[in-house]
Amino acid sequence: TEKNVIMDETAIRRALSRIAHEILEKNKGIENCLLVGIRTRGVYLAQRIAERIKEIEGVEIAWGELDITHYRDDREGGDNREAMDQAAAESILNLPAGSGGIRDKKVILFDDVLYTGRTIRAAMDALMDCGRPRMIQLAVLADRGHRELPIRPDYIGKNVPTSRHEEIEVSLKEYDGKDEVYIISN
Ligand code: 5GP
Ligand code: MG
């Protein structure tokens, strides 16, 4: 097993700054935008981008979290989506009080690594069950390829072409103590 750093703290900071600028440029500001981080590490990315946007534009952007651990179609426990009513769907989406929900919002989803696309598909299903966003965009820190669904990110920290037996490890200060991204070859 070999483990190599592909992004250090500086590279991560620069990538997130660039993504903050790209979000502002693409959306011509942040009006009606809402950042939603997926479960663990995507949440810290959404939070950091919100901070960066505040520094750049001087405006607060709402950010929340989505936990789709039990919403995937290919995980043990199978597909729970049919059994899920709207209340259940909303319980996995945590938005700040007063943000007014996702209806008619431009929702920008954040995840650490994009691989087959199944997690994002599940995240989009969950969001749709909570209301009808005006648009969904996707930001990822690393895109490792191997998509199995027609999903493509709007904002990418780093493209990391991987083979099937390689894996990416994302370490973020808030959760892992330091900022670093590695590629692990088995
Ligand atoms: P997908 O659903 O696109 O196949 O995989 C993406 C999800 O699984 C993300 O939530 C991501 O956190 C996790 N994931 C998939 N591959 C990797 C990887 O190589 N490294 C890390 N850290 N997470 C991965
Ligand atoms: Mg994940």
Image (cartoon, rainbow, N blue to C red):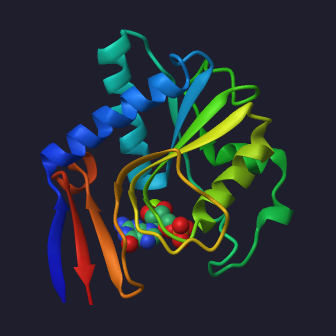
Where residue 19 sits, quadrant-wise, is top left
Q: Quadrant of ligand 1?
A: bottom left
- Front residue of this view, candidates 8 and 100: 8
Where residue 105 sits, quadrant-wise, is top right
- Front residue of this view, candidates 91 and 73: 73
Q: Is residue 128 left or right of residue 184?
A: right
Where residue 99 sits, quadrant-wise, is top right
Residue at position x 29%, y 32% in the image: 17
Residue at position x 15%, y 73% in the image: 4
Q: Is residue 64 left or right of residue 45?
A: right
* Residue 172 visible (yes or no): yes
Residue at position x 47%, y 23% in the image: 25
Q: Is residue 3 above or below residue 178?
A: below
Residue at position x 53%, y 17% in the image: 28
- Front residue of this view, candidates 149 and 78: 149
Q: Is residue 186 above or below residue 28?
A: below
Q: Is residue 39 above or below residue 17?
A: below
Residue 147 coordinates in the image, percent (x, y): 57, 71
Q: Is residue 123 left or right of residue 88?
A: left
Q: Quadrant of the N terminus?
A: bottom left
